[in-house]
Each structure stands twice: as structure tokens, then as C-alpha cells.
Amino acid sequence: MKKSKSLRLASILLMLCLITTCAVSGTFAKYVTSATVTDTARVAKWGINMTGGVSAFKDVYSTDVDSNDDAKVVAPGTAGTNAYTVTGVPEVDYQITFDYEGLSEVFLNAGTYYYYDAHGEIDATYAPVVVNETVTSSGKYTPVKYTVTITTAAGEVTGGFSAGNLTKKFDTLKDALDAIKGTTITYEANEEAGLTVTIAWEWAFSNTIETPHIQDGADTILGNITAGTSDLNGIPAGDYSTTIAYTLTMTATQLNA
């Protein structure tokens, strides 16, 4: 009986030994591959800055023109400039485009203009002013002329302006703004914008046309309309404008290749 118990105990111990051996063997006999990957990124730089400069118009020009109500004015012999700038070095391809709204410019339609007396009769004291094609552009006398210049540190300029022709003169503000609106400037990533759009204007005091009295007469009519001179009340509102106004918008947009 004791012998049987001893044999049974020995068998159990042998089995436990075999199980342990298999377990150990299973722990050390296998293939193991592992890897740890760390990844990181940041947002690409944009950093576009735009400025509109200061107004191109003033209420006082030297000592020759001085507004009596602090309003900004234009007159024969005045001139001004405004510069719109874009700076920044984006890390993406990008494009700058332009648009405008709220356009108004000084003009007087072609036609014959008379001064009238208190009775509504033509005042013979003043000669009629005949505004014809000699001093008009597309049927309008537009005394304020414009020069637009585009400079850029890099990029490709296309449309209304192009490389080698970045300064243009215009008879009207509409023509100038249309040319700017039709211009696109395209940059590659990491190209400095360095863009300046300069709009210069001038209302010449002297002129070189063959009939200066016509231009002087048209200028005088515009000044008298602003002053509210009663003997010019017969001029329809659609035949003239005595204000300059516009809103220029510059937009920089990332390009998707």
C-alpha cells in the first residue's frame, strides 16, 4: 500500500516536471518583433498682412486749397497718392486678387452749359461752356487723371498689369480700378509677397489742350455745382459728379495644386 502511494506520488511529480518544462520551453522559443513610431507636425505658416495706407485726399493742400468744413476735397492744382501693401512669407502656394465697389468720380457730361439769371433766362454775361470730345473721354469730361504702379518682391503678375508693364496711366478712375481688378499675382510657397499697389491722382492746374477756356469753363461749372450756385440748377444730376469714392479689396488665397 505504501509502495502504491509512493509510485503515485512519483508519477504526479514527473507530470508536473514535464508540464513545467513545456511551459518554460514555450516562453523562450518564439519570434518577437516590435516597433514604436513617433510622428509630429505643425500648421504651415500663413502670416499675410495687408494695409491700406492713408487717404489719398486731404482737406488742406499746402496753402492753396483749404476746405472750409474739414471735408477732403480735390481741385485744379491738387494731387495725392495712396499705397496698398501686402507682406508675408506663406509656406504654401498662394494668389492675390483684387476687387472694388462704391465707385464715384468727378465728371461732366459732354454738352453745352449756360448760366441763368434770376428770371431763368440765359445770362449773356457768361459765355456758354461747350464740353465736347476735345476734353472728354467717352463723352465725359474727367479732370482727375490716375497713375497706378504695382511692385512686388516675387510672384508672377498677369492680367491688367504684367511683368515689364507695371505702371500705367488712366483717364478715369474706373479704367484704373478695372485694370487692378483684372490683375492676378501668383506666388510659390516661401516667396515673400512684398506687394505694393500705388494709386496716384492729379487734377492738373494748367493744361496743354488747344482750347483751355473749355477746360477752365468745365472746371468752374463743377466748382459752382459743389457750391450750390443757383444759376446752374438746370443741369440734370446725371450729367455730373463732384465726388470721388471707391473701396478696393485685396484677397490672398491659398492655391491647391
Image: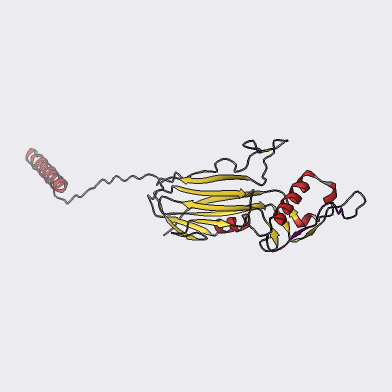
Please tell me whether residue 115 is drawn above or below residue 69 in the rendered image.
below
Which quadrant of the view contains residue 237?
bottom right
Q: Nearer the viewer, residue 96 or 143?
A: 143
Residue found 56% across the figure and 48% down from its top: 200
Residue found 63% across the figure and 50% down from its top: 206
Q: Is residue 154 left or right of residue 216?
A: left
Q: Which of the image's four quarters has the N terminus?
A: top left
Q: Is residue 125 magenta?
A: yes
Q: Position of residue 193 (x, y in %)?
A: 43, 49
Magenta-tinted stretch: 121-132
Which quadrant of the view contains residue 169?
bottom right
Q: Which of the image's four quarters has the C terminus?
A: bottom left
Q: Is residue 5 left or right of residue 128?
A: left
Q: Is residue 129 left or right of residue 22?
A: right
Q: How many marks?
A: 0
Q: Position of residue 231 (x, y in %)?
A: 85, 49
Looking at the magenta stretch, what is its main secondary structure?
Answer: loop
Q: Nearer the viewer, residue 10 or 26?
A: 26
Q: Position of residue 115 (x, y in %)?
A: 83, 53
Residue found 74% across the figure and 54% down from its top: 240
